Image (spheres, grey):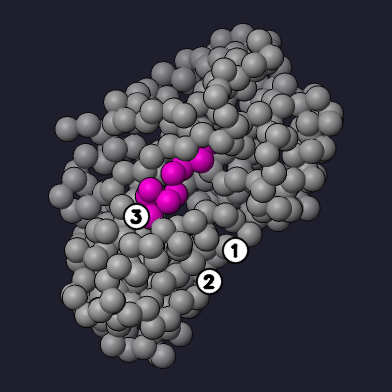
């Protein structure tokens, strides 16, 4: 398992600038195809950007595409990678179960696949699955959330897409912590599919049913930011504690503004770079050197107390 201390997060800063120099180097090692979820989301944009820059620095051609959670689109993108004779595929899967067929198709074509961010529900296909330690991150967030709410708080939860194992892992992690406090009462829960607009709409409905809530705990930052917009509109934001998960730039700004109590930062810059370096090692040697397919990367808590250490997208610098 990788050890991802703060010194490694600092090292990720080097990726965003010096790697451009690598792009000018002779790119004769073939193509690495990078497939993320949605490039319009800052989290997934960073994931694709870091992976592409790392591939180019290592001497590969690289391209980035996004499936936006659609397995049919994902399958076509895998077909394109096969047609283009990619040396490796870096994939953030669309669906824990629904993406298995696309991964198998690439592997059958002789292309190694390296999964990032979200898992697939089958071992032995991908050469590696590199993901945030979502259970650890959820526990961090829930513990911080408890510190910010009253002892007898009523709260609601916004969940991510059910097709993504991260949604259930984070929700279960929250409940493991919050269930230890019998005076906390979850009065509503809804799925907002990682989306800000859906977070806004679902929060409006939850507020109508539960106008006296004290807190919102969210599976990611985008849903939390949507909830904040709805709470602002209702004139209730000052009364409600909101927690997020990802460490996105907008969430960091919300923490600085006192609108979001915290966000749990995922080290996407670290595991995106590492996936490409593992791919390069496998292309060159036929081995990853890992002690297991699944590799977990610990998350970090960002609060008003340490938010000034936030120095770049999804990177927390060491004090």
Q: In this rendering, does residue 6 appear at all?
A: yes
User: According to the image, label 3 marks what residue?
Assistant: 139
Q: Secondary structure at mark 2?
A: strand
Q: Position of residue 255 (x, y in %)?
A: 25, 57
**Front residue (pair 64, 128):** 128
126 left or right, relative to 209: right
Q: Are marks 2 and 1 in contact (CB under 8 Å)?
A: yes
Marks 3 & 2, CB-CB < 8 Å contact: no
Q: Earlier in the sequence, mark 3 or mark 2?
A: 3
* Pointer 2 local density, CA inside 10 Å: few below 14, some 14–19, many at least 20: some
Q: Which residue is mark 1?
A: 162
The residues tagged by marks 2 and 1 sit, at their Cα atoms, a distance apart of 8 Å
Question: Which residue is labeled 2 in the image?
Answer: 191
Earlier-in-chain disc, 2 versus 1: 1
Q: Secondary structure at mark 1?
A: loop
The span shown in magenta is 130-138
What percent of the width, then of the height, locates residue 132?
46, 42
Is residue 13 visible in this depiction of the protein? no
The picture places residue 25, in percent across and down from the top left corner, at: 56, 10
């Amino acid at each position: 398992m990788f050890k991802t201390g703060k010194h490694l997060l600092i090292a990720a800063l080097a990726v965003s600038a010096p790697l451009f120099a690598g792009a000018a180097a002779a790119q004769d090692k073939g193509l690495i195809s990078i497939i993320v979820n949605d490039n319009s989301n800052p989290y997934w944009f960073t994931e694709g950007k870091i992976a592409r820059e790392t591939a180019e620095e290592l001497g590969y051609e690289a391209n980035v595409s996004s499936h936006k959670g659609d397995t049919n689109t994902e399958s076509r993108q895998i077909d394109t990678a096969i047609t283009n004779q990619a040396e490796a595929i870096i994939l953030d899967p669309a669906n824990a179960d629904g993406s298995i067929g696309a991964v198998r198709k690439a592997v059958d074509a002789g292309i190694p696949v390296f999964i990032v961010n979200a898992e697939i529900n089958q071992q032995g296909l991908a050469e590696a699955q590199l993901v945030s330690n979502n259970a650890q991150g959820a526990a961090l967030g829930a513990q911080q959330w408890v510190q910010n709410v009253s002892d007898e708080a009523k709260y609601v939860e916004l969940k991510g897409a059910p097709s993504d194992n991260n949604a259930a892992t984070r929700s279960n992690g929250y409940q493991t912590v919050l269930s230890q406090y019998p005076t906390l009462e979850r009065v509503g829960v809804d799925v907002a599919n990682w989306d800000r607009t859906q977070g806004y709409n679902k929060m409006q409905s939850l507020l109508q049913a539960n106008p006296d809530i004290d807190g919102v705990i969210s599976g990611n930052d985008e849903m939390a930011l949507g909830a904040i917009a709805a709470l602002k509109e209702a004139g209730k934001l000052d009364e409600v504690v909101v927690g997020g998960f990802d460490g996105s730039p907008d969430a960091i700004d919300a923490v600085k503004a006192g609108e979001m109590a915290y966000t749990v930062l995922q080290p996407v810059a670290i595991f995106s770079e590492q996936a490409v370096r593992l791919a390069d090692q496998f292309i060159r040697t036929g081995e990853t050197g890992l002690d297991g397919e699944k590799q977990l990367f610990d998350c970090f808590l960002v609060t008003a107390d340490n938010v000034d250490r936030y120095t770049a997208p999804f990177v927390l610098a060491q004090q």
